[in-house]
Image: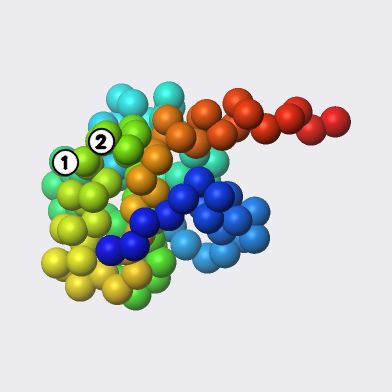
Amino acid sequence: MRTQSTEELKQKIDGHERFTLINVLPQSEFESTMIPGAHSIPLETLNFATQVEQLAGDRDQPVVLYCASEMCPASTTAAQQLEKCGFDDVSVYKGGAKAWQESEAQEPAHA
C-alpha cells in the first residue's frame, strides 16, 4: 500500500488522472469531509470491496482512500482489506479531509 501526499493527490485531480477517490468515513460525515470528485463508501459497508470494485470498474484500477486525518486508521484498514481481496493499485491519502481542508484554506483565492 502506497501513501499519497496532499500535493500528489492535487496533481492527480488537476491532471485528470484516471483513479477512484473514496471517502471511507460514515455516510453522515461525507458532506463535511468531502474532497472534490470523492465517492462515499463507508468502511463498515457490507461488501465494501465489492462496492469499491463496482465503482472503480476493476480490481486493477487505481484507488485512493481517505478518512478524517492522519490520526484516523480507517483508510489504512480499508486499504488492507482491498489488498487482501486482490486490488493491485491501492493508495492511502494519509492527511485525509483535515489536511485537504487546511491546504485549501492556505491557497490564494482565484481571481
Q: Is residue 42 left or right of residue 64?
A: left
Label 2 neighbour load within 10 Å: few <14, some 14-19, many 20+: some
The residue where tag 1 is placed is: 44
The residue where tag 2 is placed is: 72
Of residues 17 and 104, the one drawn nearer to the viewer in this rendering: 104
Query: Gap between marks 1 and 2, in whole Å?
Result: 14 Å
State the quadrant of the C terminus: top right
Q: Name the element at disc 1.
A: loop
Three-letter amino acid code of the residue under disc 1: Glu
Q: Nearer the viewer, mark 1 or mark 2?
A: 2
Earlier residue among tags 1 and 2: 1
Rendering quarter of residue 51: bottom left
Of residues 106 and 89, the one drawn nearer to the viewer in this rendering: 106
Rendering quarter of residue 57: bottom left
Q: Position of residue 4 (x, y in %)?
A: 43, 54
Image point 39% across, 39% down: which residue?
96
6 up-or-down from 111: above or below: below
Q: Give the tally of numbered discs.
A: 2
Residue 91's tag is none
Res. 57 visible in picture: no
Q: Position of residue 12 (x, y in %)?
A: 56, 58
Three-letter amino acid code of the residue under disc 2: Cys
Res. 90 visible in picture: yes
85 up-or-down from 14: above or below: below
Image point 39% across, 70% down: which residue?
61
Q: Position of residue 83 (x, y in %)?
A: 20, 66
Q: How is the image coloured?
A: rainbow
Q: Is residue 111 left or right of residue 100?
A: right
Image point 34% across, 33% down: which residue?
68
State the quadrant of the N terminus: bottom left
